[in-house]
Amino acid sequence: MNASFSVFRYMLILVALTVTSQKLSAQQKSILETVDKHQQIYPSSCIPSSIEMILKYNNKVGINYFNLQHGWKNRNDGSFDNFDGKTINGLKFRHQFQNKRGVGFPLDELYKTISDELANRRKVVISLVSGQGMWHIWVIDGKTESGDFIAYSRDFNNGYTMAVADVKKRVKAMQGTDIITYSSSKK
């Protein structure tokens, strides 16, 4: 995808988000600022990159923290399982919805879990198909007025912040996906 198309797509998404929600809440502005300052360092480091965004958003690490990505590098054999049960700087991560994708996937339960996390002011890491059978990792930040989820990420190729406001539609088309949630943990 060329850079001008990505910028155009990003601008359209921001316009759609503005029209849908009138204005971003202070919390959504905060995660968007965090994502804008963050970067994905390696082509295949989107999983640790998303964990770093969560740590940065929660003020657990500084904006120049990229240790997880540097440890991961361009690894292609990792998954959310690599962070399941791990406590990093006071946040304990949990891999959820490892169910087999398909007609019987518990979409309503997934959406309720995401909604509950957002209601408790926690972000949710989610895996979504990003085209041509490839996957990318996003941080769900909030809901649209219509009840769909808004998610942000960074594009490795051009460094732009990406936003989607149709997470439920994408997950339904994929017939399910897995997520990472987190909670505060005493060290």
Image (cartoon, rainbow, N blue to C red):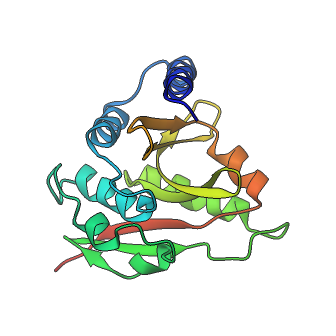
104 or 5: nearer the viewer: 5
Residue plotted at (43% across, 64% down): 47
User: What x and y, as percent, mark residue 177?
Assistant: 65, 64
Q: Is residue 38 left or right of residue 82?
A: left
Q: Is residue 67 left or right of residue 54?
A: left
Residue plotted at (76% across, 68% down): 105
User: What x and y, as percent, mark residue 26?
Assistant: 31, 31
Q: Quadrant of the N terminus?
A: top right
Q: Residue furthest right?
A: 103
72 or 80: nearer the viewer: 72
Residue plotted at (41% across, 53% down): 123
Q: Is residue 178 left or right of residue 160?
A: right
User: What x and y, as percent, mark residue 108?
Assistant: 71, 59
Residue plotted at (63% across, 40% down): 148
User: What x and y, as percent, mark residue 145?
Assistant: 59, 30
> Residue 36 lies in what quarter of the image?
top left
